[in-house]
Image (cartoon, grey):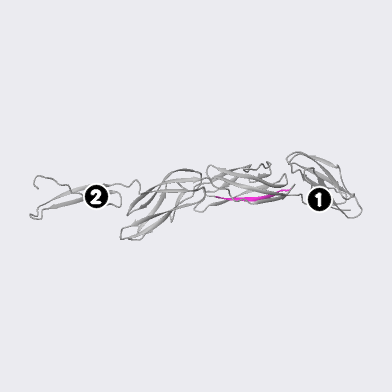
Amino acid sequence: PPGQTKEYKFNVFAYREGRGIARVVFTNPKTEEFFTVEVEFKFVPPEKVGQIKLSTACRQQAVHPISIMNPLPTAVAFKCEASIPEIRFSPADFVVPPNAEGSVDALFRPIHAGSGTATLKLSSKELGDYPYTVSYDAKPAGLEKAPVFKAPLGQETVQTFKFMHYAKKPAVYAARIEAAPGHKSPAGDFVVETKEIKAPAAGDDPVEVSVDIRFQPSQLGEIRTLLVLSSPDGGDYKALLVGYTQPPQPQGPVVMQGAKPGEVEFTNPFQDAVEFTIQVDNPCFTVGSRTIRIDGKKASKIVISFKSDKKQRGCLIINAPQVSTPWKYFLEGSP
C-alpha cells in the first residue's frame, strides 16, 4: 500500500571467505516500473565446524574419521594441518570427487600424559577452511615388554631391552632402576649398561632404540625391578625386569701346564662381604689359603698350583654359608 514499507528477507551462502554484492531488482508487474538495490556482503571464516574428542594412552593411537561433502561439479583437493605434532592425518592430503563425500582420519598418538585442547583444519582452495576444535586426554602408558633374564648365582648375563621412540624430535633418555611394586629386590642386581640412550627424530614411523641391561643376581629365586626411561622430549617408559637366579653352575676347565699356576677370578655375588671356604678334591692341586674374604660385588683371584709327573684332573670347590650348592671349577694339569 502507498506510504508503507515492507521487509524482504533472502539468504546468501558462500563456500569460502570473501566479499560479494547481491543486486536485487523490484518490478511492478502492472506498470513494469522497477528499482534496483545492491547489498554488499562480507563472508568470514567459521570459528569451528565441529568438535572432536580424542582419548588414548601414551604411544597408543586414537582414530577419528572426518567426512567432507563436495557440492561442486568438479573434484576438490584438501590439505590437512593440526596445531600439535601428536595429531596427523591419513591420508595427509586427499581429493573429494564432484558431488560426493570424502573422508580423512585424524590420528592422535600422544607422547606425554595429560589433557588439553588443540585445533585442526582441512583447507581447500575451492571450499575454504573447515576448522575443528579438539579436546584430548592422554593417559599414562602401560608397562613395556621386556626380556626375561636367567643367570647362575655368581655369573651374569646381558640382554637388550628395545622400545619405540615416537616423538618428532630427537631425545636423550635418562635411565634408572626402581623397586618393582610389591617387591623389595636387592639394589644392583640389574644394571643399565648403555651409557647414552639417544633417539633420532621419528618420522611417520617410530624409531627403535636399544638399551643393554646386565643381570648380576645376588640371591637365589626370582628378582623383580622396574626399569624407568625418561626424556622431556620423548616421554616416559617403564618395563618390569624379571630375573631368575639359578644355583651355581660348574665352570672351567682351568688348564695348568708345568709349574705355571692357574688362576680363577671369583666374584662375590652377594651385597655384603662374605668369607668363602676353598678346597680341592685332588692333592696334586693346591691353593694358598683355605678361606678368602671378599667384599660384596667384588672379585678376587684364587691361585691354584699343580705338581705331578703325569696329567691330572680335579675340581676347585668354593662354599658360602648363604647357599647350599658350591661353586665348582674343573681343573686340568699337565707336567
Q: Is residue 309 left or right of residue 224?
A: right
Where are the magenta residues, as a range? 155-164
Q: Which amino acid does label 2 sit on?
A: Gly
Main secondary structure of the magenta stretch = strand
Label 1 belongs to which residue? 329
Of all residues, the one furthest to the right in this rendering is 309
**Residue 294, label in figure:** none
Q: Is residue 321 or residue 42 the one in the foreground?
A: 321
Label 2 residue SS: strand
Give the crowd class for mark 2: few <14, some 14-19, many >=20 residues within 10 Å. few
Question: Which image quarter: residue 179?
Answer: top right
Provide residue 127's location: percent of width, then percent of height: 32, 54
Whole-number angstrom distance, CA of label 2 to CA of label 1 = 95 Å
Q: Does the magenta stretch include residue 125?
A: no
Provide residue 146's location: percent of width, then percent of height: 62, 50
Provide residue 139's location: percent of width, then percent of height: 51, 45
Q: Is residue 257 or residue 322 the one in the foreground?
A: 322
Q: Is residue 213 or residue 270 the one in the foreground?
A: 270
Q: In this view, does 253 lie to the left or right of 239?
A: right
The residue located at (15%, 52%) in the rendering is: 25
Label 2 belongs to which residue? 20
Provide residue 285's location: percent of width, then percent of height: 87, 49
Question: Which image quarter: residue 271?
Answer: top right
Question: Which image quarter: residue 195?
Answer: top right
Q: In this view, does 317 lie to the left or right of 136?
A: right
Query: In the rendered image, is residue 83 in sight?
Result: no
